[in-house]
Image: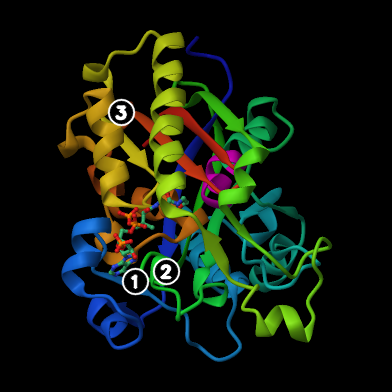
Amino acid sequence: MANKTRAAITGVHGWVPEDKLTNFDLEKMVDTNDEWIISRTGIKERRILRKPGWATSDMCAEAVKGLLEKTGTKPGEIDLLIVATVTGDLVFPDTANTVCDKIGAKNAFGFDINAACSGFLFSLATGAQYIANETYSKVIVVGSDMMSSIVDYEDRNTCIIFGDGAAAVMLEPRRDGNGIQDFVLRGDGAGREFLHMKAGGSKQPSTAETVANREHFVYQEGKRVFKFAVEGMVGTTSELLRRNKLTIDELDWMIPHQANMRIINAVAEHLHFPMEKVTINIDKYGNTTAATLPLCMWEYEKRFKKGDNIILTAFGGGFTWGSLYLKWAY
Ligand code: UT7
């Protein structure tokens, strides 16, 4: 239906810290090596936020300021701003409200969505509803995580994977058939066992003991998560293709969560999806959790064409996962 109102991405902008943490730096911190990290994950370096006093909201604000400039939008025009993150500035209030304040979005309201690595996908689907039902006309969705604030740099299983960054998209109504077409989102709370942070929440409030026990860091059983990640992303993408009667040949791009190059390869292989149509920047940024999908969009923006059929897919802590189908709008 060409004249149906759809939420379309009308701009994207990212921001990453200048400081790099390379595999060679990590070799000096834990018992690992460049060859192992590249062959097991595809990551060469990640960005780390080391600006004193800066946090997730500052990365979001930088990405959003760039987005506003690029799309010719005034802060006062924004209706809603959603931040996908697991590393909000504070336990409360939410980071989205802080970002609205920092960018001067006086007419907006905001909220955070915590769905780990699927956070941007869930937030994009949520923000799109306000546009598709014609409640609002300018919604910003930001994916941002400062993973360096919750990574244990003494744990070689996790510290090699994660990095920091932010990227934001503008959602506006379009009636030309382009925009967000459909999505399949899933969750399975039983997966929390394999990927979580032990302390700092109401289940285990912070104490001197939780700090001493290093319980304020990401805990991950990598192998288990790997298996569920491949199955999850292949499953929801297949379902989305089936119900939209799309063949792989009709797709122009797949934007997968950047957690591990071997996961990306396995998903593409299972779907018979050609790797030259898969967006990849894991080598430069590692796993930035909620920021991976919009950072990929930002990097590949110039290669996307109006009307391109694009699939986004992600898997993360929760477990949470899903896939979203959109037609690029510009
Ligand atoms: O983003 C949200 C969801 N997260 C993911 O999707 C991540 C999914 N998991 C992964 O990406 C991978 O499981 C990891 C990259 C975390 C680990 O790779 P793996 O191939 O699953 O390695 P492993 O945990 O099975 O470890 C294999 C071996 C072990 O040694 P032994 O027991 O065989 O002697 C580890 O101790 O590699 C060892 N190892 C390392 N060696 C060098 C683990 N980490 C390192 C390291 N450097 N950094």
Q: Which residue is mark 3?
A: 308
Mark whose residue sits in front, 3 or 1 = 1
Residue found at x 53% / y 14%: 3
Front residue of 130/150: it is 150
CB contact under 8 Å: marks 2 and 1: yes
Q: Which residue is mark 1?
A: 46
Give the x, y percent position of residue 328: 38, 33
**Residue where numbered disc 2 is placed:** 163
Please state which of residues 159 and 111 is positioned toward the viewer in this rendering: 159
Q: Is residue 74 above or below residue 35?
A: above
Q: What is the tally of numbered marks visible in this picture?
A: 3
1 relative to 136 in the view: left or right: left
Q: Earlier in the sequence, mark 3 or mark 1?
A: 1
- Mark 1 belongs to which amino acid? Arg
Which of the numbered marks, if any, corresponds to residue 266?
none
Q: Position of residue 19 (x, y in %)?
A: 36, 83
Q: Which residue sits at x=53%, y=40%?
A: 121
| Label 2 to label 3: alpha-carbon separation | 29 Å
